[in-house]
Image (tube, rainbow, N blue to C red):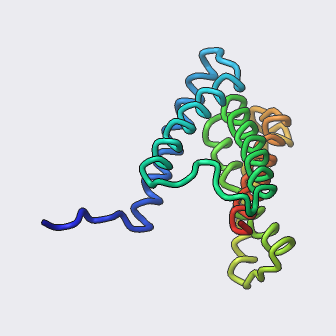
Amino acid sequence: MTQPRSLDGPQLMVISAAGFALMGALVKVAGSAGIPVMQIILARAVVSLAISLAEARRARVNPLGERRGLRLLLLRGITGFLALSCVYYTMVTLPYAEATVLHYMHPIFTAAFALAFLRERAGLGTLVCIAFSLAGLVAITAPSWQGDVDRLPPLGIAAGLCAAAGSGLAYTIVRKL
């Protein structure tokens, strides 16, 4: 009998991207139906908790983890919750494309936090990518600041940037753990 083939990194990334796209679409639909953002977050948390507990049980690991790193784990949870709240608010407030672009700015913040807190180094390629990302962000959000097109709500843009920063911080904390 042969072992089932496990998925590799690129396949898992495609599944993750598809899951994020589906989640974003469902959040947009729920928000358009008038469901409050915190209620959407609660529903996501309940589903996520059920899946996580089932997986922890299957893997025979303690769902509460070890005592080591408990403070960082708690900080990661709070940071993740705040970032997710901002992501969902952004998805409900802004057009889907702009909300997605803002959220995908998280690698910039992850690199910055890794430089500051983990003492990791950024190569020239990383710095060039960060510069292009920032230029893209300006290209997408600046027209609404100048009044040339329909204005994007500034609070939605700020929430999107906070979501990206929060995600970057959460990823950095996971790396530290």
Image: 127 above or below 3: below
Image: 73 above or below 86: below
Residue 50 is situated, as x and y percent measured from the top left of the image, at 51, 36
* Residue 68 location, quadrant: bottom right
Q: Residue at x 77, y 50 (%)?
A: 74
Q: Give the side of residue 3 with respect to residue 7, left or right.
A: left
Q: Nearer the viewer, residue 142 or 92?
A: 92
The reply to whether residue 138 is in sight is no
| Quadrant where the C terminus is found in the figure | bottom right
Residue 6 is situated, as x and y percent measured from the top left of the image, at 33, 64
The reply to whether residue 22 is in sight is yes
Image: 16 above or below 94: below
Q: Nearer the viewer, residue 166 or 77?
A: 77
| Quadrant where the N terminus is found in the figure | bottom left
- Residue positioned most to the left: 1
Residue 116 is situated, as x and y percent measured from the top left of the image, at 87, 72
Q: Give the side of residue 160 with respect to residue 14, left or right.
A: right
* Residue 104 location, quadrant: bottom right
Q: Residue at x 69, y 68 (%)?
A: 175
Q: Give the side of residue 128 with respect to residue 11, left or right.
A: right
